Amino acid sequence: MANQNQDIPEMNLDRKYSKKIPNAESPEKIKKNVEKTKKELEKLKSFIVKKYPFTQSLSVLPPQAIKKFIEEEEMPKETEKHMQLYMIVPEEKLKEIPKMTQEIVKQIEKLNSNKEHKIWLQIKTPIDIWDMCLDSKFDLAGAIAMSFPLYDKGFLGALRMAEIHKSLVLQKFEKYVVSYVIAGSFVGGKATPTSDLDVYVIINDTDVKRMPRVELKERLRSIIYQYVGEATALAGVKNELHIQTYLLTDFWDAVKDANPVIFTFIRDGIPIYDRGTFMPWKALLKMGKLRPSPESIDMFMKTAEKTKEMVNRRLLEAMMDIYYSVLNPSQALIMLYGLPPPTHKETITMMEDIFVKKEKMIKKSDMEILVKAVKLFKEYEHDTKFKISGKKIDEMVKETDAYLKTLKELRKQIEKGAQEKVIEQIYHDVFGLLKAGMGKKAQAVLISEFEEDFVKKGKFTAQHLRILKDLVKARTDFKKGKLNFHKVEEARKNTSILINDLIEYNQRCELAGKGK
């Protein structure tokens, strides 16, 4: 997440987009006006953010929207020529707004040396903006979304992204779109620079004649989705826009059936465009006029009756998942140790015999979850009415985490032991062959004589000598804990070349009746 106290980068708007929004003033002109009071704005922004760190956004409203704000918001007429500073704070700070306004205005008067561009301050909460939308003042909400950002914690950027996407969609096929609604956590005031934004687009399919409704929905949905990337780029944000597309007829059926998801959407959603469809539903729901039919009540009652059965089944599935999550890796480690794969009935006994009693790598108490999981599985196999509680599952999940950590450490110990056996075995094989041909001598002497009598005389190559010395070094490094699995494997493969050639040489010597 970017540092929220840094300056917000310039809005990623181009001439292409300014043409798509009717009556939109060019970003260049807005920027030019802002530049005239840049120093004052920067100082003011720093003051506000430092004194009121809960500030969600700070921006300058587009000049062409000021007149509309004066009319709709009943602002003083003389503020039409002022630069409009728009500040958004959390709803819980609503009572502090009058005091904040006085303090910020004093700061504005102190900093504002440019009398030509006076600043007018408005402090609002997200709910104030949602109320504008619920009053069908979509142009005001759109102006706020497209205001020039001075500081933003994510709210303004997400709103700007939705506004741009809506405008692109409406320009393409406005006659089909009846409602464009934002919902989810963003409406609840939890926006961040990376949070997702949920959007619902309702399409009128009541007069479609030339194509099936499903085809219409897929075509429009595809186009609507294509605009997501463009809107995100133009808005200059990192938020993701999640689009849900509904046909009006399907949406109405969901309303009649009292679909809980749709009712929640109607209750909490905020339209930023509506042609008299979504708002009446919202009002009817608030009045208690949207009620489920008897059939839908029966359906949901039956669903509720099945919930307990479904939950019990999922708890059993969770128990089975835990069973296999501790059984399978246990069997794998027994195989890694060098034994054939055990059955699930043999696993506990073998784990205890090998790793607890023989190798003493783990404690018996470390295996409690394995014992418990196998026992419950046996009960489940023999009892058709077997049940398990959610509390028991939670306990087993915690125990499983601890057991898997134990198995990870056990694996390291097994692999280390196996690697040690490999290194020691190939070391003894090689030097056993050297002693068979050269006599029982110390390691250093054998290596020296091998070089003088065999390599320099052309009986073996320099590669054989290198392999021999690498083997000795690998054995020394392993004892110091410096060798890993891959190095051991490399030593084993290379040493096999030397071993084969030594065996062949010794056989030739025997056949020839020579001592060497």
Image (spheres, helix red, strand yellow):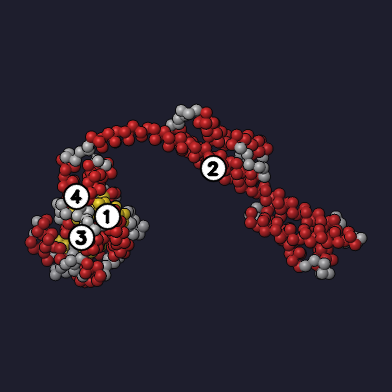
Task: Give the quarter of the image for residue 65.
Answer: bottom left
Between marks 1 and 4 in the image, the one whose residue lies nearer the viewer: 1
Q: CA distance from mark 3 to mark 1?
A: 19 Å
Residue lying furthest front in this view? 210
Residue position marked by numbered label 4 in the rendering: 278
Q: CA distance from mark 1 to mark 4?
A: 24 Å
- Along the polypeptide, which appears first: circle 1 or circle 4? 1
Secondary structure under the numbered disc 3 in the rendered image: loop
Q: CA distance from mark 2 to mark 1?
A: 54 Å
Q: CA distance from mark 3 to mark 2?
A: 57 Å
Task: Give the quarter of the image for residue 33.
Answer: bottom left
Where residue 236 sits: x, y (%)?
30, 63
Q: Which mark is residue 25?
A: none
Q: CA distance from mark 3 to mark 4?
A: 16 Å
Residue at horizontal 46 percent and vertical 38 percent from the top = 318
Secondary structure under the numbered disc 2 in the rendered image: helix
Residue position marked by numbered label 2 in the rendering: 404
